[in-house]
Image: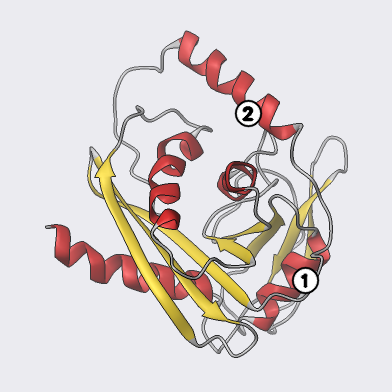
Amino acid sequence: MAYYRPPGPAPDPALVQRLTQQQQEMRQRVRAEPLAREPRLIGGCDSSFPTPDTILSVFVVLKFPSLELVEKVYNHGPVDLPYVPGFLSFREAPNVIHAFAKLQNKPDVVMVDGHGIAHPRRMGIAAHLGVLLDLPTFGVAKQKLTGVFQEPGPERGSITLLTDGRTGELLGEVLRSKDKVLPLFVSPGHRCDQATATRLTLACLRGYKLPEPTRLADYWAEEFKKEVR
């Protein structure tokens, strides 16, 4: 997700408390499990902020495993929540869900540009969307949000673990998606497990750093921005 981080005053403590409680409640609903069947369609989603107070969210749907593009949609709307560090999912999710509602072809699993449980409260955008949509989701992020890891080997396909530095809890896997490029951070969201998230990420690589569902979502986000300017 291409986050807009506006400067401003410290967030309202009451708002932070309310959002924290909502995340804790949603976390209780997250399930880690393998997919019931191999996906026929895989979705990818991404969001960006064309202006400080608007958001553009994109969904693409691809055939799996061929990765042929089936559908692409977007929704452009206002941002209703102020920026609060650690709670960006609440800024993005409503508009992402509006974009999802426009799809004629619903995916069997969704790859999200962002984190799943690799989040301080285990509720990154992929987990958040998975719970709200009740769909299998996982996150593929370009930067670490929390946890510790050893650098994977320089070659494509090298993997190391992302863990909680205090408890040792497995939060995700760090994957080198292309030779000698910075790694990706893969973590399950909802109704998905780590093995599935990593396997699908690897299966969606086509020579770029980003796997096709999120790469194409990012590409179309830039294209759709031209329509809303």
Q: Quadrant of the C terminus?
A: bottom left
Determine which residue is flagged by label 2.
23
Specify the quadrant of the image occupied by residue 53: top left
Q: Which residue is drawn at 59% across and 64% down?
A: 111
Q: Which mark is residue 182?
A: none
Residue furthest out toward the right: 168
Say if 80 sits above or below 172 in the image: above
Q: Which is more N-terminal, label 1 or label 2?
A: 2
Q: In the rendered view, does 104 fall on the left or right side of 116? A: left
Image coordinates for residue 177, horizontal then vertical, percent = 63, 78
Q: Is mark 1 on a helix, strand or loop?
A: strand
In depth, the one of 200 and 171 nearer the eye is 200
Q: Within the image, what quadrant is residue 40 found in? A: bottom right
Name the residue nearer the viewer: 47 or 72: 72
Query: Residue under circle 1?
Result: 159
Q: How many marks?
A: 2
**Percent coordinates x, y for residue 76 in the rendering:** 26, 51
Residue 148 x %, y %? 74, 49
Q: Seen from this angle, which residue lies furthest front?
A: 104
| Amino acid type, label 2 | Gln
Which residue occupies 57% across, 46% down? 129
Q: Which residue is drawn at 49% across and 70% down?
A: 105
Q: Identity of the amino acid at label 1?
A: Ile
* Residue under the image location 41 percent in, 18 percent down: 11
Query: Where the N terminus falls, by quadrant?
Result: bottom left
Please identify, in this view, whether the residue under mark 2 or under mark 1 is nearer the observer.
2
In-front residue for pair 21/163: 21
Using residue 139 as the reference point, say whether residue 200 is left or right of it: right
Q: Residue furthest left?
A: 229
- 2 left or right of 85? left
